Image (spheres, rainbow, N blue to C red):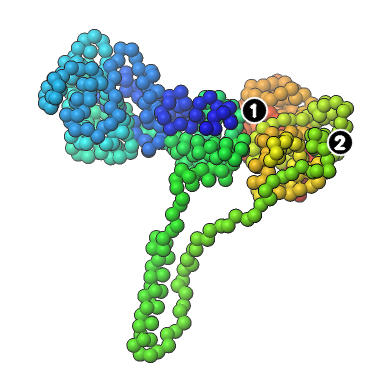
Amino acid sequence: MYKDYFGLRDEPFSIAPDPQFLYMSERHREALGHLIYGMTIDGGFVLLTGEVGTGKTTVCRCLLEQIPEDSEVALVFNPKLTVVELLETLCDELRIDYPPGNLSNKLFIDAINRFLIDAHSKGRKTVLIIDEAQSLSPSVLEQIRLLTNLETNKQKLLQVIMLGQPELKLMLEQPELRQLAQRITARYHLEPLPQNEIKAYVNHRLSIAGVERRLFPVSTINKLYQLSGGIPRVINLLCDRALLGAYVREQQTVSPHLLTEAAREVFGEQKKTKLWTSPNWRWLLLALLITIGTAQLAANYGVEPPPLVPAPATVSVVVEEVPQPEWDRLEWDEQQPIDQSDTLAYQTLFDLWKISYQNGQGSVHEQAGQQGLRLGNKRDSFEQLRHLNRPVVLKLKNFQGQEFYVTLTALTDESATLVVGKQRQTVPVSTLARQWLGEFSLLWQAPPDYQGSLKTGATGKMVQWLDQQMAFLNSRKPSREQNISLTGNLLEEVQRFQLSEGLDPDGIVGTYTLIHLNHKISNQQPTLAVGQKG
């Protein structure tokens, strides 16, 4: 539903185990490496475990795309089988003939053994892959072990790869399965994604689906980790629902608040804490018993009960928040022509920089350049605007479908202050969000030799300038190297700076990084938030 709105070719967060969307984290690479290793060793069991939704099945699908041509593979995705059903499924997967209606274990096993011997004689390897193996019964696991008994002097004729949840490891620790456990030649436990890989995971799937721009700001990514615990399937569910919410609200990015709403829909409303689940329940029960006992004594002996003493613990009461009323819309200043909104907005922006803008005296880019500044046109989120902390020109749309430009001069978590035409208005951020198209323009001051973003390994005057700025921020002396490059300690300093400023620590020095550097080093530039200096 939201694909066309965001310009996506495919659904980026489908929970189907599509190998093309597999994000090869370090953990997933190791898991796949173990499975590939299991395909090449001379027999035995390979074990891959992990929590629900960590990507075991997707890794397995990726393995299937790399299976050597000289392999025969049997896949079992429904392991809740009896011994006979397992043997029948194995025969079906390997295209082994057997009499219709056969229920004899021996007949199935003999047929499977003949197949294994024949495949080995032709130089072919036979592999059995079982997903959700924690659902296998001990008797079925023992039968699988017995199937691997067929071997030559050098190798077993059947290789078994089992994928399952952590319970599978516990099952294999049972005494009756110790023989099977001893045959496990490779094992790996797939952990959830760490926090520092969530952003790369989300952006990877968006990129494969056809969108390179950032739809999930850094603050939303952090919230995503809190809500998902790093489990890819949960990440997919939350991101899919959040993009749908952004589409419905006509927003260009997903805010942390919108992601939280999506989580409520995915997980369901949190149940209110019951009285007896609170750690204070014993005090409450004691107070209740004392009260009942005192009342009973009073009734029996005609004595006035003493005043009730509060229990020595505080009981939390869940209070439902009632939304505060908001303005419905942001309207254009009727005293000004709406077709001149861009001119008025840029005049306000230039005034904040204490420079002049004259309509008809060249483009905005040209007039900015003449005064030593650059104009950046971006598409991003409110969170990024707060990070940049610069006044910006926003492109809005009213409820009649007309587009117009305003200047954002202040922004908090809850409200935004704008110059609309020649009027100053303060509105809730939620009101502005309904009309903002996600586009903004800002002025910034580039270094004298800046020709574009600096990437790892870059050299030249711009890198020397960057080293001087890092030296100032880190209280060190600038490098004396004649041909210093953006590598080593300098690259690490840049990445630490980016991380401290809430930027992506990618080491690429572009517009956003330079604007944050300007804030740190100079206090002569206008800021977005009231009362703050750069």
Q: Return the disc, 1 or 2, that comes first in the chain's sequence.
A: 2
Query: How far across and how far down the image is residue 146, in percent?
Result: 17, 27
Residue ranking furthest to the top = 122
Give the residue drawn at x 55%, y 40%.
245
Q: Residue type at mark 1: give it.
A: Ile
Q: Quadrant of residue 187?
A: top left
In-image side of 405 versus 186 (left or right): right
Give the residue drawn at x 80%, y 34%.
339
Q: CA distance from mark 1 to mark 2?
A: 30 Å
Q: Residue type at mark 2: give it.
A: Ile
Numbered tag placed on residue 355 in the rendering: 2
In-image side of 412 versus 407 (left or right): left
Give the residue drawn at x 24%, y 28%.
183
Q: Quadrant of residue 344?
A: top right
For the question of whether residue 184 can be seen, the reply is yes
Q: Of helix, strand and loop, which one carries label 2?
A: loop
Give the residue drawn at x 30%, y 29%.
77
Q: Quadrant of residue 378?
A: top right
Numbered tag placed on residue 508 in the rendering: 1
